[in-house]
Amino acid sequence: MPRERVVSAQARSDEAAAGKADKPLHATLRPERFDHYVGQRDLLRKLRITVQAADQRGEPVDHTLFHGPPGLGKTTLAHVIANEIGTKAHVTAGPALTKPADLVGVVTSLGTGDVLFIDEIHRLSRVVEEYLYVAMEDYKIDITLDSGSHARVVTMPVKPFTLVGATTRIGLLTAPMRARFGLVEHLDFYPPADLLVILQANAQKLGVKAEATALEELSHRSRGTPRVANRLLRRVRDFASVEGDGDITADLCRRALELEGIDAIGLDALDRSFLRALIDVYSGGPAGIEAVAATLGEERDTLEDVIEPYLLQQGLLARTRQGRRVTKKAYDHLGLPMPESADSGLFA
């Protein structure tokens, strides 16, 4: 049974329920327009230009691919694009489209200019990809009826649409698929200043009074990820309503985060276990990812997609040809002495 991580950027079904519960009192926390979106300034400027140019020409927006760690706003941007051009956003996921018939049902239901968002697009089957190519380029889809000597191909028109794909592992996307996107953009982690603006706006939407210092604390512990920031805000809100009078103070915020095991830079128990395993078992590294995964009892993909990106971004971990190494910054953060045998150049 995989352990629950509050700081995981992966979406959870319980958060969708929480959003619905909050909606009668306040609008959803997801921004709906470019003007409401905080962060990713360069990307946002490119999207504004692309959307406005397409609107002036009366054409659908170019097919767009977003890649980067989970929780940074790829799904949100798809909805923002749809809202900006006044159309609907249809959301699905790569693993849900297992056969061509699944894709046919989705694309034939699209209206003119609608946005089709496919999450985890790298997990599309090759057969479905082949059908999607034609739909993206020629706005039609070919359906084979019957088989053998009675087989015939029926071509169904598809209304012009915009495909927005999202992936956390762009390297697994096929070259022909990447080539069919007009825009391919990477989403970066958010600086604490941007997360603070997001937290201030969302605390207001949730009807929560919060001290500025408390929200600043949350912004620094949210791992540069809006989804994590919103999740921590809800956890601290619950803690404040039970342990306090409902207002989020700096003291209540720190106590809530300590209860969750989240330290000053946003690391949780699994992050620290990853670093400690490298230090205690492998003397700081280098160690292969398979060996570390076996030591922790976790899947390799979990470590590469969920744990490592933030550790690498914070400079706590280094990837080398020989394997993973812990940096000097990680030793300092954990309060551990760095071994004298460590190569200062690699551990700096």
Image (cartoon, grey):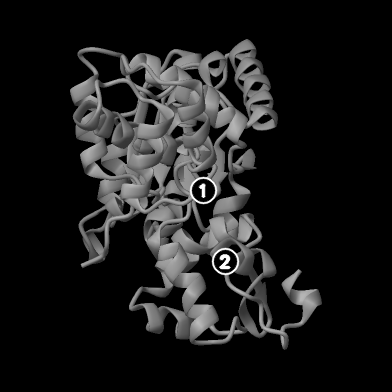
Residue 239: which quarter of the image?
A: top left
Q: In the rendering, at what x and y percent does residue 329 appear?
A: 66, 63
Residue for point 57% across, 66% down: 335
Closer to the N terminus: mark 2 or mark 1?
1
Q: Residues within 10 Å of mark 1 (few under 14, many from 20)?
A: some
**Horizontal relation, residue 9 to residue 169: left or right:** left
Decide: is 341 above or below 279: below
Decide: is 158 above or below 264: above
Residue 83: which quarter of the image?
A: top left
Decide: is 79 above or below 10: above
The image's mark for residue 53 is none
Q: In the rendering, at what x and y percent does residue 111 appear?
A: 36, 22
Q: Amino acid at mark 2?
A: Gly
Residue for point 35% across, 74% down: 298
Give the quadrant of the C terminus: bottom right
Task: Please count the marks in the image.
Answer: 2
Residue for point 28% across, 45% down: 12
Q: In the rendering, at what x and y percent does residue 283 appear?
A: 58, 86
Whether residue 136 is visible to the viewer of this picture, yes or no, is yes
- In the rendered image, the residue lying farthest to the right is 345
- The residue pinned by badge 2 equals 335
Residue for point 48% across, 74% down: 276
Residue 128: which quarter of the image?
A: bottom left
Q: Nearer the viewer, residue 277 or 151?
A: 277
Disc 2 versus disc 1: distance between alpha carbons?
13 Å
Q: Amino acid at mark 1?
A: Ala
Residue contact between numbered discs 2 and 1, judged by CB atoms under 8 Å: no
The image's mark for residue 264 is 1
Whether residue 174 is visible to the viewer of this picture, yes or no, is no
**Label 1's element?**
loop
